[in-house]
Amino acid sequence: MPVAKTLSAAINGIHAFKVEVEVNISPGLFNYSTVGLPDAAVRESQERVLAALQNSGFEAPVKRITVNLAPADLRKEGSTFDLPIAVAMLLAENLVSAETPPTMIIGELALDGRIRPIKGALSASMLARDQGVARLIAPKENAREAAVIAEVEVIGVESLPQLIQFLNGYEQIEPTKVSVDEVFQQPDWDGLDFSEVKGQAHVKRALEVAAAGGHNTLMIGPPGSGKSMMAKRIPTILPEMTIDEAIETTRIHSVSGKLGANMALVTRRPFRSPHHTISDAGLIGGGTSPTPGEVSLSHNGVLFLDEFPEFKRSALEAMRQPLEDGNVTIARSSMSVTFPSRFMLAAAMNPCPCGYYTDPSKECLCGEHVIRKYRSKISGPLLDRIDIHIEAPAVKWREMMGADGGEPSSAIRERINTARKTQLARFTGTSVYCNAQMNSRQIKKHCELDEASRSILKTAVEKLGLSARAHEKALKVARTIADLAGVERIRPEHIGEAVQYRSLDRDRL
Ligand SMILES: Nc1ncnc2c1ncn2[C@@H]1O[C@H](COP(=O)(O)OP(=O)(O)OP(=O)(O)O)[C@@H](O)[C@H]1O
Ligand SMILES: [Mg+2]
Ligand SMILES: [Zn+2]
């Protein structure tokens, strides 16, 4: 069989595409060429494939070897094709039996024949399912991730010799099985808990509303008021992830190579807190072969930006599009890639450079001009995209010394889980998971106001000069507050609370 074929997958963004690997071996002087838009890593695969074959006890044929990756017009990156190329060569030389059932193969080869993990195994497994391919041969370290797709039989392999033994029927390999219920077991929060936070009842309330509906939130207050402390405890009250959310998030982490070995799924909502010196590309995504940035790595979770105005203005402005659209497109001359980016932004800042502008006990030393310049870093359009603005005042000595820290995170999380379930039921059959993600049409449908509520909102719009976007944000937040209260109709007190969370619109920060 001079021409042999195997099936593999190429990753573009978070999607996998079918790639047919064809190997033709014909008589002639030794020559090895790869065609079909391969990038450098694919071309280097030649060295790895030949060395791995040799070190597994197979001499590479001293003939003309042509490897074709089809379709040719699709850009292929990385080292995923090493293994399917090696198997196709062995098939062409009749050294392994043709694989049955239909099989997809992914994996990188080390020179000594070991099989190394690759990026995007979950996406490849989803592709196999969608294409009706029954079996996926994948690196052992990726097997649990791929096996999340129950319809595909995943064979995890450690080395090329082992795979050859398997294909020739000399070795059995048990398909990898993953119980999704088991991987979803309750996470542990490193001992952090909201009960450690004293006072700040209304900030905690705002964070509860934010976590319940997935709303972007900005905390503003003097140094030491507990902003960073509270933000770090947000993960302890985030609602459970649905399986669909977990799969979406896992795909992003997987194509970035950030999923640990033998890990099946990201089951905890991400909480990412990049430092303010992060580059635009680090935040938004980028690179010559585009990789997801923090906005995508926090998809379905929280992106916490502490010291908000210290971030580069360009990075903050570039965040507007992903915040608005829930995805981010990275354009390159050779390709353009889109990554999901539906995260809940949690930001914290001081009211002025010295920090004490709103603190009654300490004098602020900043001039008005300096304060204005500091705040102007957070532009109006960016502020517009933040649903909840909340002041975290200095904690009073009395509160600090009091014993009561209030409710534990578990109690808050229980209410949030209930409110989130209401939302999931509301949005069944759509791609929306929580109130913050509603589009204008959904807002109209689900946020109807009675006469009294409408008049409260109207007054607020006039007094605060709310933009159309800020007006929609208030409606969404009111929806979440009503969901937390367990009622179908938004009541005046719900819209009243939602409007309070627009305080910075008034200050024209
Ligand atoms: N409300 C609070 N309850 C209990 N401890 C608190 C509270 N606020 C602050 N603290 C204590 O003070 C420390 C500093 O607080 P934190 O770092 O959260 O302040 P911050 O508001 O982020 O300040 P900065 O503006 O300087 O970043 C915390 O680690 C905690 O020990
Ligand atoms: Mg802080
Ligand atoms: Zn100041």
Image: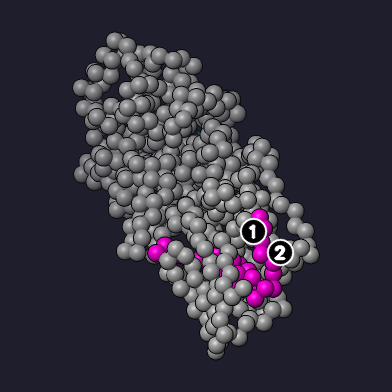
Q: For residue 458, which numbered disc appears in the image?
A: none
For the C terminus, the quadrant is top left
Q: Main secondary structure of the magenta part?
A: loop
The front one of 11 and 390 is 11
Q: Position of residue 392 (x, y in %)?
A: 41, 32
The magenta segment is 73-101
Above or below, comparing residue 228 to residue 457 in the picture: below
Secondary structure of the residue carrying tag 2 is helix
Q: CA distance from mark 1 to mark 2?
A: 10 Å
Secondary structure of the residue carrying tag 1 is strand
- N-terminal of the pair, mark 1 or mark 2, is 1
Residue 158 position by quadrant: bottom right
Residue 494 position by quadrant: top left
Q: Residue at x 38, y 13 (%)?
A: 491
Q: Position of residue 266 (x, y in %)?
A: 57, 45
Q: Tell me, yes or no, whether the highlighted magenta stretch contains residue 382.
A: no
Looking at the rendered structure, the kind of residue marked 2 is Leu
For the N terminus, the quadrant is bottom right
Q: Residue at x 29, y 10 (%)?
A: 451
Residue 192 position by quadrant: top right
Above or below, comparing residue 448 to residue 104 in the picture: above
- The residue beneath circle 2 is 167
Looking at the rendered structure, the kind of residue marked 1 is Ile
- The residue beneath circle 1 is 137
Give the left or right position of residue 108, taking residue 394 as reference.
right
Q: Residue at x 27, y 32 (%)?
A: 469
- Dot 1, how many residues are within 10 Å of its Cα: few (below 14), some (14-19), or many (20+)? many
Q: Is mark 1 within 8 Å of ligand 2?
A: no
Above or below, comparing residue 499 to residue 158 in the picture: above
